[in-house]
């Protein structure tokens, strides 16, 4: 299946966000001493990925003309962005991404990137997916199942970050029911737990993949139910799209 979004940078519109992405081996020397202190006891892989995320975050903020300063973390690990800004960070082996924006039209953002080689076993899939998601996934052509499991996982991680940053609520995997369509680069999610204001139970975001990674992102607009004009995706439509694509790929 050809994904509409092939680079994590393309998850976010440049009119709203400043995005920096690249290798996940960051230079610790570029960190603020207070940032370095957050990971001083961590293993080197963690320190390098943390450094990459922070260095990209600083670059993203510089492009927004925000004065440099340390990005520390709250007690649940959420980055604390400089006053008047917001953002999100994700890193995995080989790839890190940071997205930042000035507050105003957006309240919070969430991003996630995962390596495609981290495919899930069935027991992990059962932990990540709700019943309806599992039913949908198991109706997909077999070769797509591991990747779609990982895509759902990535989307739920991005949702977790965005919702936490917007409301302070920590969602579980069962708290969001997700539908995705890679050929449109879109996902929609229904939150099954009340968070934030009324009418915020529908989220829409973007999702993509390339040969090595899957990635997803969404944001929480400052007002109105959604920043996107699209209606929510339906499992039945998406299944039809995925199956049609798959048929075309067969010899
Ligand atoms: C926190 C969590 C989302 C991190 O995801 P991950 O795939 O392990 O790692 P990623 O590299 O993608 O993201 C790590 C970054 O997320 C950010 N982050 C951590 N906790 C966060 C939070 N509560 N809110 C927002 N962002 C957070 C941090 O910037 C962190 O990087 P840093 O420590 O270097 O600053 C994940 O470990 C977790 O606890 N998930 C909870 C369960 C869940 O996802 N439920 C789904 C609900 S629908």
Image: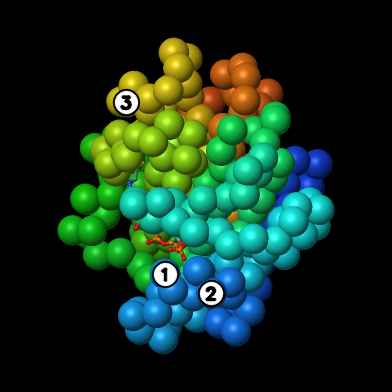
Seen at 44% across and 73% down, the residue is 37
Quickly name the residue at label 3: 192
> Is residue 133 visible to the viewer in this orientation of the structure?
yes
Dot in front, 1 or 3: 1
The mark that comes first in sequence, 3 or 2, is 2
Dot in front, 3 or 2: 2
Q: Is mark 1 within 8 Å of ligand 1?
A: yes
Distance between mark 1 and mark 3 Cα atoms: 34 Å
* Mark 3 crowd level (few <14, some 14–19, many ≥20, 10 Å Cα): few
Q: Residue furthest top?
A: 198
Looking at the image, is 172 positioned above or below residue 1? above
Quickly name the residue at label 2: 33
Q: Which colour scheme is used?
A: rainbow
Quickly name the residue at label 1: 38
* Mark 1 crowd level (few <14, some 14–19, many ≥20, 10 Å Cα): few
What is the x, y in percent for residue 91?
50, 67
């Amino acid at each position: 299946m050809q994904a509409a979004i092939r680079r994590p940078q393309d998850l976010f519109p440049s009119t709203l966000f400043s995005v920096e992405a690249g290798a996940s081996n960051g230079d610790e020397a570029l960190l603020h001493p207070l940032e370095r202190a957050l990971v001083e006891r961590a293993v080197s892989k963690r320190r390098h990925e943390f450094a990459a995320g922070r260095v990209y975050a600083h670059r993203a903020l510089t492009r927004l003309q925000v004065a440099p300063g340390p990005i520390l973390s709250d007690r649940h690990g959420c980055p604390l962005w400089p006053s008047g800004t917001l953002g999100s960070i994700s890193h995995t082996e080989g790839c890190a991404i940071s997205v930042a924006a000035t507050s105003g039209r957006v309240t919070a953002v969430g991003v996630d990137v995962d390596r495609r080689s981290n495919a899930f076993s069935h027991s992990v899939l059962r932990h990540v997916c709700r019943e309806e998601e599992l039913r949908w996934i198991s109706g997909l052509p077999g070769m797509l199942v591991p990747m779609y499991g990982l895509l759902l996982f990535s989307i739920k991680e991005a949702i977790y970050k965005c919702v936490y940053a917007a409301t302070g609520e920590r969602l579980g995997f069962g708290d969001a029911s997700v539908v995705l369509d890679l050929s449109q680069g879109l996902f929609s999610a229904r939150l099954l737990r009340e968070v934030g204001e009324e009418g915020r139970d529908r989220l829409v975001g973007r999702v993509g993949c390339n040969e090595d990674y899957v990635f997803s992102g969404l944001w929480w607009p400052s007002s109105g139910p959604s920043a996107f004009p699209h209606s929510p995706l339906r499992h039945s439509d998406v299944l039809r799209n995925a199956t049609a694509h798959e048929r075309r790929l067969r010899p």
